[in-house]
């Protein structure tokens, strides 16, 4: 699976949008972009995934560039409960059971 | 159940002892996964079950680690002759492996924290 690069940490103001970048310049055509997050003392939680098109669900939006070499996870209105480590993962459909977590981005939402 | 349940939530043992960690997946989920997370790092894949069989155990670090899922639901991760380096949070996840392509969403439990003294 392709490697991803994320900033180690970022702060966000409560109520504002949080934009989390992820680079995956070696992504191949059959690989999906997944986002999970891990709140302290909990297991990782699925947020969203996409292949080519932008995606939106009740938790977040995923914007994937046209060349697919990078993506941005958007939390539209961050709350204190969104403080967590956010993991961007690229995974091939054929290898869809094995998530390769990197170090992720530690997001701190401040009041 | 409503979520993935793992027991015990905390386990403290002495070096050289045997440990079992249990995972109850979401009812009906055919796929089950074990991951291990050391302090300050992301989770690392250990083993994946599809039904009763281990489809991929390539992440198990050595032969002291073994996992079973005899009836295709509950799974037990077994660690023999524990070492201090085995201290970590052991995470279990399950999925139903259905849905659109690429949509294999894993639901994780809260983990079992193992401390080897």
Image (cartoon, coloured by chain):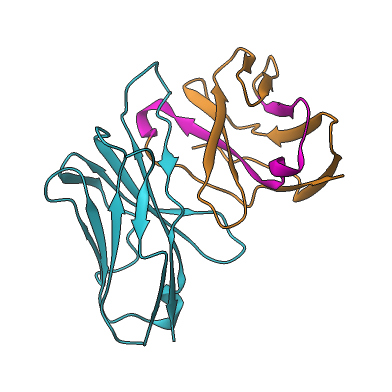
Is residue B21 covered in magenta?
no
Magenta range:
A69-96
Residue drawn 84% across and 32% down?
A15
Q: Is residue A87 visible?
A: yes
**Residue located farthest toward the left when viewing the structure as drawn:** B71
Q: Colour of chain B?
A: cyan
Residue drawn 38% across and 82% down?
B83
Could you tell whether B79 is left or right of B110 in the image? left
Tell me residue A88's x, y (percent). Answer: 61, 38
Could you tell whether A25 is left or right of B24 in the image? right
User: Where is A18 relative to A43, above or below?
Assistant: above
Tell me residue A48's x, y (percent). Answer: 57, 27
Tell me residue B43's x, y (percent). Answer: 50, 54
Q: Quadrant of residue A98?
A: top left
Is residue A72 covered in magenta?
yes
Residue drawn 73% across and 27% down?
A74
User: Where is B21 relative to A59, above or below?
Assistant: below
Q: Which of these two is toward me, A38 or B43?
A: A38
On the rendered image, what quadrant is the C terminus of chain A found in? top right
Q: Quadrant of residue A56?
A: top right
Tell me residue B58's x, y (percent). Answer: 31, 53
Q: Is residue A6 visible?
A: no
Q: Which of these two is toward me, A18 or A24?
A: A18
Residue drawn 25% across and 79% down?
B18
User: Where is A33 relative to B36, above or below?
Assistant: above
Could you tell whether B65 is left or right of B43 in the image? left
Q: Which of these two is toward me, B111 or B34?
A: B111
Q: Colour of chain A?
A: orange
User: Where is A38 relative to A67, above or below?
Assistant: below
């Amino acid at each position: 699976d392709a490697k991803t690069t994320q900033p180690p940490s970022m702060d966000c103001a409560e109520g504002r949008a949080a934009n989390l970048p992820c680079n995956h310049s070696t992504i191949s055509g059959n690989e999906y972009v997944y986002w999970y997050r891990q709140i302290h003392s909990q297991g990782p939680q699925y947020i969203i995934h996409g292949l080519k098109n932008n995606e939106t669900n009740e938790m977040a939006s995923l914007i994937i560039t046209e060349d697919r070499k990078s993506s941005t996870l958007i939390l539209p209105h961050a709350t204190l409960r969104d403080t967590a480590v956010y993991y961007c993962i690229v995974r091939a459909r054929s290898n869809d059971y094995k998530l390769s977590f990197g170090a992720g981005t530690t997001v701190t939402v401040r009041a | 159940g409503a979520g993935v349940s793992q027991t015990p939530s905390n386990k403290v043992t002495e070096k050289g002892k045997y440990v079992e960690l249990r995972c109850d997946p979401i009812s009906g989920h055919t796929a089950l996964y074990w991951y291990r997370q050391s302090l300050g790092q992301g989770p690392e894949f250990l083993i994946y079950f599809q039904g009763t069989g281990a489809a991929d155990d390539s992440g198990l670090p050595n032969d002291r680690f073994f996992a079973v899922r005899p009836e295709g639901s509950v799974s037990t991760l077994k660690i023999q002759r524990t070492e201090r380096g085995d201290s970590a949070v052991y995470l279990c996840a399950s999925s139903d492996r259905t849905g659109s392509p690429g949509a294999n969403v894993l639901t994780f439990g809260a983990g079992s924290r193992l401390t080897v003294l």
